[in-house]
Structure formats: C-alpha cells, structure tokens
Amino acid sequence: MTATTSAPGSAETSAPIDPDYPLARVPKEHRKTNASVVIVIAGFLFFTPTMFAGGQVAVEFAFGEFLGLAAVATLVLATYIALIGGISARTGLTAVLLARAVFGKIGGKWSSILLGGTQIGWYGITLSTLTDFVGRAFGLDYTWPLAVIGGIAMATTAYWGFKGIEVLSWVSVPLMLALCVWVLVLSLDEVGGPAGMLALEGNGGLSVGAALTIMIGTFISGGTQMGNWTRFARNGSVAIAGTFVAVIVVQFAMLFFGGVGATAFGQSDFAELLVQLGLLVAGLFLLVANLWTTNDNTAYAFGLAGAELFNKSDKRPFIIAGVILGIIIAIINAGSVLIPFLSLLGVLIPPLGGALIGYFYLVWKGTDPGIVYGSEPLVRWSGLAAYLAGVAAAALGSTFDFGIPAVQGIIVAIIVAPLAAMIEKRMSGARVTA
C-alpha cells in the first residue's frame, strides 16, 4: 500500500504513495467500473440528516406541496452534482485540486478549508445522530464513549480508501432501502393510505425559498465534492449520467421518506421515530450501516482536503485529525445547530461549485486543461471573482428571503466565470490557461 513517489510538479521526492491519489490524477488503468462508482455515490447519498431536513420541511407544507419542493430541490442538486462529477471524471482530479486550478495555489486553500471543515462538521453531526439514537433507545446517561468508539470505527473504511467505501456501500444501501420502505408502510397505515397523506396540511412556518435552501443545503457540501469519487470513473459522459440518475433517485427518496415519517407521526427526527415505532433492533442495525457509509465518505473527503491544504500526498493523517474533531463535535451535541448550519452552507458552498462549472465548461470548453500540480498561479483572480459574485448573490437572497439563494449563487458564479476570465486575459495581455 505504500511506496515512494512525488506528486506531479511537487517538490516532494520521497513521499508515501496514497493509493487514492490525493495530489494527482487517477491514472486510466486505476479507474473503476461504473457499478463501483455508482454504488459509492448511492452510499454517500443515503444520508440520514437529509431525511431530517425532509421531515422539517414536510410538516410546514401540505404534503403535495412538499413533494413538489422536494422534486425541485432534487433536480437542482442532481444537475449541479452531475456537472461537478463530470469534471472530475474527465480530469481525474479531486474537488479541492479542481478548486486549486480555478482559484490558484493560495485561493484554492480557502476551498480546502471550507469543504474540509464542513465535512468535519457533518462527520460530527452524523455521529451525534447515532449516539443520540443509541442513548435514547437504551436509556444511557452518558453517550460520549459511543461517540469515541463509533467515530473511530466509521473512519476505518475511509482509511482503507475507495475500495473500503465500496464494500460497505454494497452492504448498507439495500439495508437502508429496506428500512425506508418499512417506515413508509407504517406511515401510510397511520394516516389512512396515500389519500390520507395527501390530505394533510402543514403548519406554514417556512417560506418556499427557505425550504428549498434547507433541502439543497443538506447535500450541497458533499455534492460539491462528488468528484472525489467520480474521478475513478472510466468515462466522463457515463459519470455525468450515472451521477444524475443516482442523485435523482436517492436524494428524492431520502427527502420523501423523511417527510412521510414526520407528516404521519409528527416526528422529524428519524432516529427518534424509529424508537417511537418500536423498530429498535432493526433500526439500530440499519441506521449504523447507513450512517457509516455517510461518514466514511465524509472522512475520505476531509482527508483529501487536508492533503491539499498541507501539500502532503497522503490523506490518512488528515482523516485521523478530522475524526478527532468530529468526535468532539458529537460529544458537545452540535446537531442542535443543524438548520442554521445548512443555511450557511447554502450561501458559501454552491458558488464554489458554480465557479468550477463555469470555468471548466465555458472557459476550458469542457476539456482537461492539463494542469500540473504545483504550476498553478498563486491566485487566479477571475476564479475568485466568480466565486465572490456567487456568494454575494446567495447572501442577498438568504438575507432578504427571495428566490433560492443556493441556486442564485451557482448561476451567478457560472455566468461571471467566463466574463471575469475574459477581463483577466485582456488586462494581463496573456491567454487564460492552466
């Protein structure tokens, strides 16, 4: 598993090889099958906090309205994530290396801090979901030992790499699907079937924009980093199509199942709902499998971000450090700030992906620009301008509650990227390339 090499263009000459290439392109001969990539994506998308967000929104709207909003949120995420995934499939680069190419060596560090930091936060929130469930189920007064044990265990497959995540995903995805169908059956029985569900009215406490921001925000951070896995795909077009379908199916299912449970039983916390329904043993087993597939992907992502941030061609030390921080977050029960956290992600992260999409598809015309690691400019001002313009658009929408802030941020960043690149080219008198 280890040997010595140097990242392309790097000053390192004797760094340990990480088999997942955190600072380099994934070679064509090391790409995976379509089935391997899709199952890993599906495992990452089976995300219990997404169900929680779906439940939070569902109780505020008539159920038919909620389904429409969930469909819109899912379509936005699927389009965004598929485009991001296609970039990495065609270049073989991680999300943070793409950001480094677009924003420059220094500008790209913000991406690593933002994406890696939020994934550490999600690791802790997801872990606290598990410890809270187990604590309530067994009447435990202290759950911090569970956070320590669970946090370490969930990181083992990420430490192993893509293969470890894939193996776990093949086991957990069918199990979680079975649990969701089970809850659906019980929920429909509780309200008198589909007609009874559609007849239920919501509380009306959320605006449409806020509801969409919450549902998009649940996976916008992870979705922006989808390239960490699609870079292993053998074909860019297939990666785009496969990612789009996977997000449409799984993301909508997570929102739907969370909304069904919350609407039928008045409980948006999925873990608490399982206890309420008497699904303790089965729920515990299946919830552990689900949260594990989410958190090993999360740990993998912040490991890659740390490798770029500190210019080390080994993600594993950063997985260990991030897991420690995630365990601390779980112990202090940071899940109580989930909704404000989602709103913040909806402002800061989507414009980053928008800038990547705008630069790759509109400036580099959808082709690999041939960037060599270490040769990027210190700061690519046009990329940063696109990102900041997107953040401004998202922040205005969030502050004054109009539109869909996350979507506005993405669109503005995409539009500004080629315009800013053109201005930068004219001002420098040189062609904007890698």
Image (cartoon, rainbow, N blue to C red):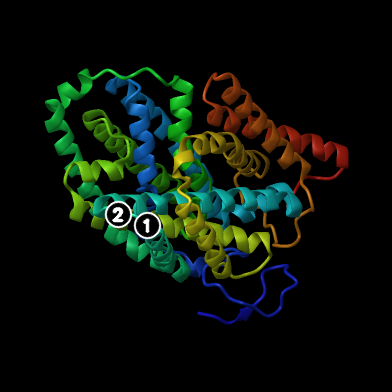
| Residue 84 as seen in the image, left or right of residue 247 | right
Q: Mark 1 — residue?
A: 143
Report if residue 244 is visible in the image. yes
Q: Amino acid at mark 2?
A: Val
Q: Which residue is mark 2?
A: 134
Q: In the orientation shown, which residue stands out farthest toward the front? A: 141
The answer to whether any part of residue 76 appears in the image is no
Give the amino acid type for the residue marked by disc 1 in the picture. Thr
Residue 147 position within the rendered picture, expressed as x and y whole percent measured from the top left: 41, 59
The percent position of residue 401, horizontal first and vertical second, equals 54, 20
**Do the residues bearing badges 1 and 2 touch, measured as CB atoms within 8 Å?**
yes
Task: Please rate how many residues cluster around mark 1, counting C-alpha atoms within 10 Å: few if below 14, some from 14 to 19, many from 20.
Answer: some
Q: Which label's residue is closer to the chain start, 1 or 2? A: 2
At a point 27% along the width and 61% down the height, the residue shown is: 171
Between the residue at mark 1 and the residue at mark 2, the CA separation in whole angstroms equals 8 Å
Depth order, front residue of 320/277: 277
In this view of the protein, which residue sits in the foreground, 406 or 289?
Answer: 289
SS under mark 1: loop
